[in-house]
């Protein structure tokens, strides 16, 4: 049993509330697909506050590293970015990792510093839903294997924090980190990129 499992509507409401609170706006002013930077003037500190509020309301651990930082760890930097612009490979990775964004936004010439302008409330909704899926998978695995302290399989999703709690002995387990889940997703994308298409994308960026 998962306690108070959040629906997509719940997540959308929580994200809009977090964005509105952080940007001193009314929830009805926030459009899911509007650029937080361009439309609402969000700055880096605002984004950090949004992340904190979403983590608290959805009981999640969002990534501390950006998608670009993770991607450069998984792919050779010179294949991902050249002269401050995303390569064809970099654009394709972002296109697959950010399905909520219109694919037309990932066009040749997109500069690294402009990627943050594509972040919307829907970006956080999609991310939160993905982390909730990962959280559910982790909880099921923990229940299957049992509490490492007492062996009980009655492990519950905390209603107050980003953690699981053994109902028998009170042992606490942190939910999966957003960075770990994001890295897993990038591995899947990287596997897809290890194909003839990937080779052609990389070749298209060769000088």
Image: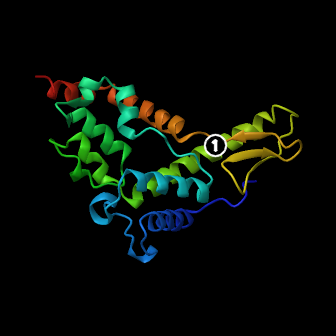
Above or below 103: residue 140: above
In depth, the one of 14 and 1 nearer the eye is 14
Find residue 122 and report its horizontal and vertical position in percent. Answer: 41, 59
Question: x and y percent of residue 2 in the render?
Answer: 72, 54
Quadrant in the rendering for residue 79: top left
Is any part of residue 196 visible from this angle?
A: no
Q: Residue at (51%, 48%) from the top-left corner? A: 130
**Which residue carries the number 1 mark?**
137
Residue 63 in percent (x, y) is at 49, 42
Query: Is 32 on the left-hand or right-hand side of 50?
Result: left
* Residue drawn where x is 37% and y is 69% of the image: 31
Asked whether 146 or 124 is in front, the reply is 124
Which residue occupies the extreme left position in the image? 207
| Quarter placement of the C terminus | top left
Check disc 1 and report its element: helix, strand or loop: helix
- Above or below residue 135? Residue 70 is above
* Position above or below: 138 against 197: below
Residue 177 shown left or right of residue 120 in the figure: right
Colour pattern of the rendering: rainbow
Q: Say which quarter of the image contains residue 32.
A: bottom left
* Residue 25 in view: yes
Mark 1 Cα-neighbour bin, 10 Å: few <14, some 14–19, many ≥20? few
Residue 158 at x, y percent in the picture: 73, 52
Q: What residue is at 15 percent from the left and 42 percent from the top?
A: 108
Which residue corresponds to the image point at 39% horizontal and 70% vertical from the top-left?
A: 30
- Whether 174 is drawn above or below 118: the answer is above
């Amino acid at each position: 049993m998962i306690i108070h499992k959040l629906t997509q509507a719940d997540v959308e409401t929580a994200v809009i509330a977090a964005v509105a609170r952080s940007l001193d706006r009314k929830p009805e002013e926030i459009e899911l697909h509007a650029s937080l930077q361009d439309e609402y003037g969000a700055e880096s500190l605002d984004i950090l506050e949004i992340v904190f509020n979403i983590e608290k309301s959805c009981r999640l651990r969002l990534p501390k590293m950006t998608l670009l930082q993770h991607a450069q760890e998984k792919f050779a930097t010179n294949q991902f970015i050249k002269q401050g612009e995303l390569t064809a490979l970099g654009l394709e990775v972002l296109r697959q990792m950010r399905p909520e964004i219109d694919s037309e936004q990932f066009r040749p010439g997109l500069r690294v510093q402009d990627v943050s302008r594509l972040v919307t409330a829907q970006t956080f909704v999609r991310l939160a839903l993905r982390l909730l899926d990962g959280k559910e998978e982790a909880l099921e695995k923990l229940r299957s294997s049992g509490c490492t302290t007492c062996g009980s399989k009655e492990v519950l999703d905390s209603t107050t924090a980003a953690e699981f709690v053994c109902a028998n002995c009170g042992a606490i387990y942190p939910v999966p980190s957003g960075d770990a889940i994001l890295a897993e997703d990038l591995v899947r994308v990287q596997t897809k990129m290890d194909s003839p298409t990937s080779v052609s994308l990389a070749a298209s960026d060769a000088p």
